[in-house]
Amino acid sequence: MTDTIGEKTYVRVAARAGVSERSASIVRAGAYDVAIFSVRGELYAYENACPHQGGPIGEGIVDGATVTCPWHAWCFDVRSGKMTLGDFAALRRFDLYVEHDAVFVATEPEDAS
């Protein structure tokens, strides 16, 4: 199921109840693999690619609000997408919303306009 809001297209990707606090849910949204994280009930979606060398960030270790890339241990704050040890890298964020337990993710990252 898809939905268009303004100029953005969203696709239904998961049930809200299926998104865990302990690991990411990796879904397909348009041409992208997207990792959805839950921190204290709030959902965040990012391209499933570490900005360092494209490692699958959604397969990384999730500890509270931090995810560690499984390839080279770069760490990111899931709430902001920013690297925890510097301000020179960030994950590509996707807009999302929840409606009736369904999670919808934009088919393009926020910075792609």
Image: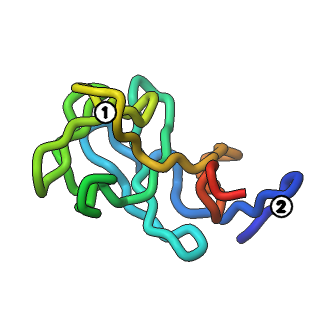
The C terminus lies in quadrant: bottom right
Q: For this rendering, which residue is in front, 24 or 33?
A: 33
Q: Is residue 72 visible?
A: yes
Return the mark for residue 55.
none
Task: Between residue 57 and residue 100, name the one nearer to us.
Answer: 57
Mark 2 vs mark 1: give the one in front: 1
Q: Quadrant of residue 22?
A: top left
Q: Is residue 23 above or below residue 54?
A: above
Quarter of the view holding residue 38: top left
**Quarter of the image that includes the N terminus:** bottom right
Find residue 29 and report its horizontal and vertical position in percent. Answer: 56, 68
At 22% from the left and 38% from the top, the residue drawn is 62
Relative to 21, 10 lies left or right: right
The image quadrant that residue 50 belongs to is bottom left
Find disc 1 in the rendering and name its residue: 83
Label 2 to label 1: alpha-carbon separation: 31 Å
Q: In the image, what residue occupies the spot 70% across and 46% down?
A: 99
Residue ID at (12%, 44%)? 73
The amino acid sitting under disc 2 is Thr
User: Horizontally, is 28 left or right of 6 in the view?
Assistant: left
